[in-house]
Amino acid sequence: MELDRNVHSVFLLYYHLILVVKYRRKVFDKDISGRAEEIFRYTAPKYNITLQEWNHEKDHVPILFKAHPKSETSRFINAYKSAGSRLLKKEFPQIRRKLWKEYFWSQSFCLLTTGSAPVEVIRKYMESQGEKH
């Protein structure tokens, strides 16, 4: 496992993000997903975020990315959703026929931390630290 580094820290921050189309409308196909991924890759470096994996279903996209401790993930997600929504609707006018009003993404999202060690392994390690009573 290779860790990321900066001057003062060592870190490895993976996140699993799930973005859902408003009302779970089925708008994603290969072309739309590909363009959404391009927009993500363009926006991410400004927030010290690196895309690791991208996939799509017809009504949502699961994304795996790495971040820096100073990354503002919620700001990034909102910036991506805003730019992505605007550009996708402009470049793929057929999307508008499937959406309700102007909304593309659901307001909510799912963001999960991931790591190489399961939580139970970390918990047992932490419990084993310190003085034994």
Image: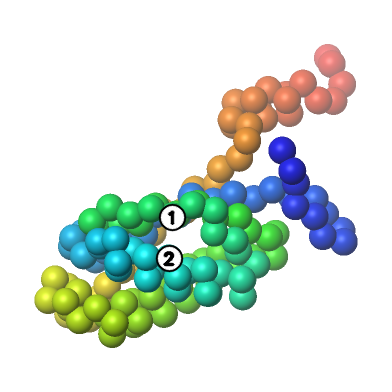
Disc 1 secondary structure class: strand
Would residue 106 be visible to someone looking at this image?
Answer: no
Q: Nearer the viewer, residue 39 or 68?
A: 39
Mark drawn on residue 108: none
Q: Nearer the viewer, residue 129 or 15?
A: 15
Residue at the disc numbered 1: 54
Residue at the disc numbered 2: 37
Tell me if 8 is positioned left or right of 39 in this view: right
Looking at the image, is 117 positioned above or below residue 84?
Answer: above
Tell me what residue is drawn at x 23 percent, y 56 percent: 58
Please tell me in which quadrant of the rendered image residue 44 appears: bottom right
Tell me if 26 is positioned left or right of 112 in this view: left
Give the residue type at disc 2: Glu
Give the residue type at disc 1: Trp
Tell me if 6 is positioned left or right of 104 in this view: right
Query: Where does the image place residue 18, in percent across and percent down from the top left?
Result: 39, 54
